[in-house]
Amino acid sequence: MVKITTSETLDMLSSIFEEPIANLSPEVLRDDVPGWDSMGALALMAELDERFGIVLTADESRKMIRIGDLLHFLRNHGVLAD
């Protein structure tokens, strides 16, 4: 299984949400990431499925309040390396 570090995850999110990586950290609220809108959420779902074979449902996505919630999700699926 492919593993990803927190730093690599933030880099991935920077690319998906078109947000400078300096603005992203586990504590950042979803609402403070302009690109994490409905289209961004779909792009995130597609990336996780393509890269890791993980299905992120719409319900799971909506429950994510912070970037840290996504990191927790990845950790629970055995993808986060640290």
Image (spheres, rainbow, N blue to C red):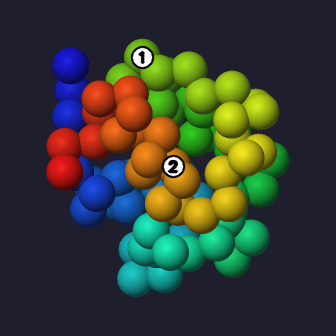
Residue 9 lies left or right of residue 8; in this view the side is right
Q: Residue at x 29, y 33 (%)?
A: 79
Structural crowding at the residue carrying mark 2, measured as other residues with C-alpha within 10 Å and reported as few (<14), some (14–19) or many (≥20)? some
Question: Label 2 vs label 1: CA separation?
Answer: 15 Å
Q: Quadrant of residue 34?
A: bottom right
Say above or below: 47 vs 53.
below
**Residue picked out by circle 1:** 53
Q: Which mark is residue 70?
A: 2
Question: Which residue of the protein is positioned furthest toward the bottom in this rendering?
Answer: 22
Determine contact: label 2, label 1, CB under 8 Å.
no
Residue kind at label 2, given as amino acid type: Leu
> Can residue 7 be seen from the camera position used here?
yes
**56 vs 49, nearest the viewer:** 56
Secondary structure found at label 1: loop
Closer-to-camera residue (63/32):
63
Q: Amino acid at mark 1?
A: Gly
Identify the residue shown where x is 21% and y is 34%.
3
Q: Please count the marks in the image.
A: 2
